[in-house]
Image: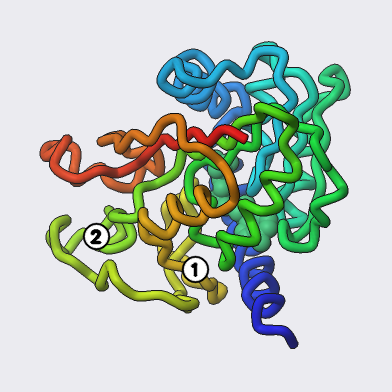
Amino acid sequence: MDKNKKYSEINKEAWEYATTLHQKARQEKGIKLEYEMEKVFPELVLTNLDNKVNFSKKKILQICCNNGLELIALKKNGANLCVGVDISSLSIEEARINTSEAIEEVKFYNCDIYDLQSVEFEGMFDIVLFTTGSLRWLHDLDLLFQKVFHWLAEDGQLVIYDMHPITEIINDDRQLQKSQFEIIRPYFFSGAQYSFNSLDYIGHTNDHGKQNCWFMHKTSDIVSAIIENNFSIKMFKELPNDIAGIYNKLDEHQGMVPLSYLLIGQK
Ligand SMILES: C[S@@+](CC[C@H](N)C(=O)[O-])C[C@H]1O[C@@H](n2cnc3c(N)ncnc32)[C@H](O)[C@@H]1O
């Protein structure tokens, strides 16, 4: 099997499994859809990503959309067509259930983003959006941003609101016995990283069920791949916000380490 296909196969299995854990946790904790949406509203919609992105009336494509809550929240707050793509069939199934029939113009596709041909969405979107924990799963940033460029309409925006690459090298709350400032791996390394770390970010269990495969993209790798694919970067802001909710231990040291970033690229 082509090695890139292998990464996607591994991650598909890992995310199908993680989705079952998330569904179980939501059920056990009685987490309601409305509650989760209320959590994503302030971040994504009300503050319009630091007031720099206007989602209103925009056609939005979200890559790695998981169960679609963010897109649905955007749609409910005035976006135009919203399309989500994710490799996990269970997440997309859930996204379709979460989208009540009353919400038109929200569509979800289950596929590996690298299998989606550039021409399929040629020039369709005003915004292509990546949020928390998306880029680390995608092995080829160059090919990714090449596709994104084609999917965007003239003057369209690439919006990334993701975890900062620095978070890959420090401890999160799952390793309580270690100092949060211990460097657990080098920043300068590349290639596929195979791991059994739990992906259960809803139940926060340590269930190591399936292997996953992620990629250490340095800040410079991300920025370079965007520039090389003809975007102009309009904004790049490093932020102290723990958008993944797994760096609570750092709360008392807020501001010492960047935990997320917002990048806006213009076609
Ligand atoms: C951390 S989750 C993203 C969560 C999302 N930001 C949210 O808040 O709902 C990462 C997602 O990336 C998806 N994913 C991983 N590799 C992918 C690929 N090659 N193509 C499409 N989706 C992929 C996974 O299935 C998973 O749903």
Which residue appears at 25% of the width and 36% of the height? Answer: 240
Image spot of residue 250 (x, y percent)? 18, 44
Which of the 4 quarters of the picture holds residue 35?
A: top right
Q: Are marks 1 and 2 in contact (CB under 8 Å)?
A: no
In front here: 193 or 99? Answer: 193
Q: Which residue does the image show at 48% across and 43% down from the upper left?
A: 132
What's the distance in space between the residues labelled 1 and 2, CA to CA?
16 Å
Q: Please tell me whether mark 1 sits on a helix, a strand or a loop.
A: strand
Q: Can you identify the residue that label 2 sits on?
A: 171
Q: Nearer the viewer, residue 88 or 114?
A: 114
The residue indicated by pointer 1 is 214
Rendered-image quadrant of the C terminus? top right
Give x and y (percent) for residue 263: 44, 37
| Residue 257 screen position, x and y as percent | 19, 45
In the rendered image, the vertical position of residue 223 relative to residue 243, given as above or below: below
Q: Is residue 97 left or right of residue 188?
A: right
Identify the mark nearer the N-term, 1 or 2.
Answer: 2
Q: Nearer the viewer, residue 82 or 101?
A: 82
Q: Residue at x 79, y 46 (%)?
A: 93
Kindly indicate the quadrant of the structure image that contains residue 167: bottom left
Q: Please, what is the three-letter code of the amino acid marked with disc 1? A: Trp
In the rendered structure, the answer to whether residue 258 lies left or right of residue 30 reads left
